[in-house]
């Protein structure tokens, strides 16, 4: 999305807050995502991004959308040893034709994401300023939906007889209308979808996350199928059997 084109359960308030909720799917099969990525000669990041874009396009009836992704921001050698937060948002545009297949979307995102990374040195503030799309309030000027893949070296720590494990607590806020974060664990993936509680019911967020898993399944099994297969209802009780919905 971008420009508020994604359907919401409630109208956007004049002065939006950052109030947010979270829904989670755990476990999701990491090996299935990795296998699909190898088949398409790409990375798990691109496969997951394609599934997210597919779910958003189907639910919103969209053929042109923007998804924010993170870029490290350390594009100059002199920044390598500087302590600080340099990560910034990189808008990823997704344009679809009526006959775009799931496999073609993966291939397109593989190329366009790399192209966008090559231009990652462009400051996000500069991009917003030159496009003239600044809007008041807490809402991001370009991005309503965000995606990130969190791949840390370790989730478990042991020192001096003590052990600790890392988890991601939800603070009850969100920077974006929709924010899908996938955490890579040693044996599985954990999918968290943050959503603005001013705009979306929890049931809608649950449906979107289930739709992402369904799209993952389709990319693996039937990549020749169309992205815009149908415009799905925003809320339904899903009883689909997702291969990606359980670690194997």
Image (cartoon, rainbow, N blue to C red):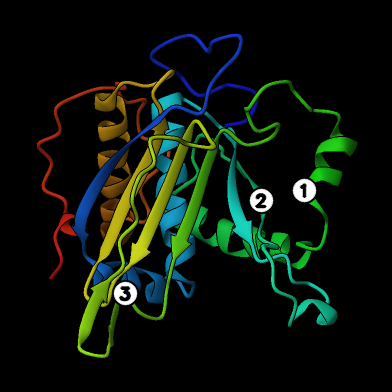
Vertical side of 171 occupied by 30: above or below: below
Label 3: which secondary element:
loop
| Residue 193 is at least partly visible in this image | yes
In the image: residue 62, left or right of residue 164 = right
Vertical side of 76 occupied by 84: above or below: above
The residue pinned by badge 3 equals 155
Give residue 78's quadrant in the image. Answer: bottom right
Tag in front: 3 or 2: 3
Q: Position of residue 117 (x, y in %)?
A: 70, 64
Residue at mark 3 to residue at mark 1: CA–CA distance: 31 Å
Residue drawn at (49%, 50%), measured in percent from left and top? 147
Count of all numbered marks drawn on residues in the image: 3
Residue drawn at (44%, 64%), measured in percent from left and top? 150
Give residue 135's quadrant in the image. Answer: top right
Q: Position of residue 95 (x, y in %)?
A: 61, 40
Label 2: which secondary element:
strand
Q: Dot 3: within a 10 Å radius of its alpha carbon, few (fewer than 14), some, or many (20 or more) residues? A: few
Residue drawn at (81%, 53%), measured in percent from left and top? 123
Q: Are marks 2 and 1 in contact (CB under 8 Å)?
A: yes
| Residue 228 is at least partly visible in this image | no
Q: Which mark is residue 124?
A: 1
Q: Earlier in the sequence, mark 3 or mark 1?
A: 1
Q: Are marks 3 and 1 in contact (CB under 8 Å)?
A: no
Q: Position of residue 129 (x, y in %)?
A: 87, 36
Residue at mark 3 to residue at mark 2: CA–CA distance: 25 Å
Q: Which mark is residue 229?
A: none
The residue pinned by badge 2 equals 89
Q: Earlier in the sequence, mark 3 or mark 2?
A: 2
Q: Earlier in the sequence, mark 2 or mark 1?
A: 2
């Amino acid at each position: 999305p971008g420009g508020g084109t994604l359907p919401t359960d409630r109208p956007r308030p004049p002065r939006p807050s950052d109030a947010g909720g979270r829904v989670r799917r755990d476990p999701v099969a990491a090996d299935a995502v990795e296998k699909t990525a190898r088949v398409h000669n790409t990375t798990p990041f691109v496969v997951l991004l394609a599934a997210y874009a597919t779910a958003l396009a189907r639910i919103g009836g969209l053929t042109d959308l923007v998804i924010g992704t993170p870029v490290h921001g350390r594009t100059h050698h002199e920044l390598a040893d500087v302590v600080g937060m340099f990560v910034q948002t990189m808008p990823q545009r997704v344009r679809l034709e009526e006959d775009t297949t799931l496999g073609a979307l993966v291939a397109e995102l593989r190329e366009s994401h790399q192209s966008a990374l090559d231009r990652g040195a462009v400051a996000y503030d500069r991009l917003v300023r030159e496009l003239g799309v600044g809007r008041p309030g807490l809402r991001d000027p370009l991005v309503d939906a965000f995606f990130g893949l969190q791949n840390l070296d370790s989730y478990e720590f042991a020192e001096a007889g003590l052990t600790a494990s890392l988890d991601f607590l939800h603070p009850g806020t969100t920077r974006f209308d929709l924010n899908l974060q996938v955490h890579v664990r040693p044996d599985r993936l954990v999918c968290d979808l943050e959503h603005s509680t001013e705009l979306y019911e929890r049931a809608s967020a649950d449906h979107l996350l289930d739709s992402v898993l369904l799209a993952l399944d389709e990319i693996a099994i039937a990549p020749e199928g169309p992205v815009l297969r149908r415009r799905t209802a925003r809320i339904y009780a899903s009883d689909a059997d997702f291969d990606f919905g359980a670690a194997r």
